[in-house]
Image (cartoon, rainbow, N blue to C red):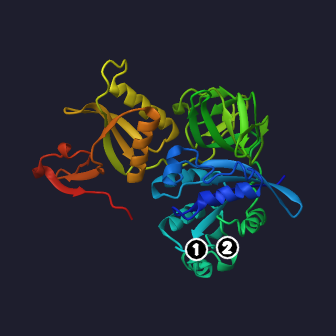
Amino acid sequence: MPIRNFSIIAHIDHGKSTLADRLLQKTKAVTERESKDQLLDSMDLERERGITIKASAVTVKHIYEGENYELNFIDTPGHVDFTYEVSRALTACEGALLVVDSTQGVEAQTVANAYLAIENDLDLIPVVNKIDLPSADPEKVAMEIEQVLGLPAEDCIFCSAKTGEGINELLDTICEKLPEPRPAEVEQTRALIFDSHYDDYRGVIVYFRVFDGSLSKGDKIKMMGTNRTFTITELGRYTPTPVPTQTIGTAQVGYMVAAIKTLEDVRIGDTITIDSDPASEALAGYEEPKQMVFCDFYPASSEEGSKKTDFETLREAVEKLRLNDSSFTFETQHSEALGFGFRCGFLGLLHMEIVQERLEREGGAEIVQTAPTVNYKVDLNDGTTLDVHNPADLPDPSQIRHIREPIVK
């Protein structure tokens, strides 16, 4: 069965998650009754804010020219703070749907995500969405895509994720235009981890894409980056409900459970191989995300008589969230006024808000937050450079030659 692996990328609010919902409906992966808006956004916070925070991977079937195709697609966030999630998802694909709103045209994240996809050698299918709106001008937007991104205007697919118009044509184009996955390059098994999350009952659930060989239930696997070994107890695919399976072969996407206790044992971008016959070199992973904004979290005062201290509750919440979101950093911090807390680094202000809200909801911690700061570089007269997070750490002004702050291009 031919396979196509692709991502959906776009600027925030251009209709990615709605398009994903409609693709699931058209391929009969979900019935009309099961269907709901933002089906893949499983986090409460995603549904309330109407944004995607975590990427999610789903397998569906589509019949094109009498042949049954397997489509693996990954819905990604559009917000600039979550570009890291997008770059991870793109590594597992050969193609991408670049969704552009027909009323707003090409915007900043459209360009950023398109370049991210081109850097990963992906084939792009431009999709002009929301053509059902009265103010839509799909022809103009198609020309804009050609001028800004160099993708031919006649290749654009016009569709409306809301009404379902043009979705069948889009599915056919995915089967026809997107490249086949590359054949296995080595005999040994190699699979790339592109996401993981923590489940209270089953431990860490790992999402991966097999590039070479296959993985089967019961295999003893080895993580090439951390050298840890585990035994697979459950393998499966999301369709979009989890369906257990015995084997996942070359070019397929799936999830596995292997009694992994902590997220620290799983590195996103690591390569999975079979312990008894390991591959000689790992697959190319990802760049580590760079934190831009820093702030301190301290526990608020707690009820009297609770067994755990507030700091322990906060520490548990932070460590648990770190399992799910490897793109923020934390280190212990002590303040004379507020006691022990954490200095955390984030990709942006929205990311900081989301992390704080998730700590309070999922970890049950009450948080006092300091004002967000950025990292300054201080050049001293003796030629050395200091990294300063906190204004209190600035050296004597007579020693300072320059103070530099980060600027976003």
Q: Nearer the viewer, residue 59 or 394?
A: 59
Q: Residue shown at 30%/51% (left/top)?
A: 374
The kind of residue on which mark 1 rests is Ser
Which residue is disc 1 drawn over? 102
Q: Position of residue 408 (x, y in %)?
A: 37, 62
Mark 1 and mark 2 residues within 8 Å of each other at the beta carbon = yes
Q: For the residue carrying disc 1, how many other residues have a C-alpha within 10 Å: few (<14), some (14-19), or many (20+)? A: many
SS at mark 2 in the image: strand
How far apart, in angstroms, are the residues tagged by discs 1 and 2? 9 Å
Mark 1 vs mark 2: which is more N-terminal?
A: 1
Q: Nearer the viewer, residue 80 or 390?
A: 80
Residue 275 lies, with reference to residue 93, above or below; the image says above
Q: Residue shown at 30%/21% (left/top)?
A: 304
Q: In the picture, residue 403 is in which quadrant?
A: bottom left
Residue 277 lies, with reference to residue 63, above or below; the image says above
Q: Residue furthest left?
A: 398
SS at mark 1 in the image: loop
Q: Residue shown at 68%/53% (left/top)?
A: 73
Q: Position of residue 105 (x, y in %)?
A: 54, 74
Q: For the residue carrying disc 2, how many other residues have a C-alpha within 10 Å: few (<14), some (14-19), or many (20+)? A: many
Q: Residue shown at 16%/46% (left/top)?
A: 395
Q: From the viewer's perspective, is 161 left or right of 44?
A: right
Q: From the viewer's perspective, is 219 left or right of 56?
A: right
Q: Residue furthest right?
A: 66
Q: Position of residue 131 (x, y in %)?
A: 63, 73
Q: From the viewer's perspective, is 363 left or right of 125?
A: left
Which residue is disc 2 drawn over? 158
The kind of residue on which mark 2 rests is Phe
Q: In the picture, residue 248 is in which quadrant?
A: top right
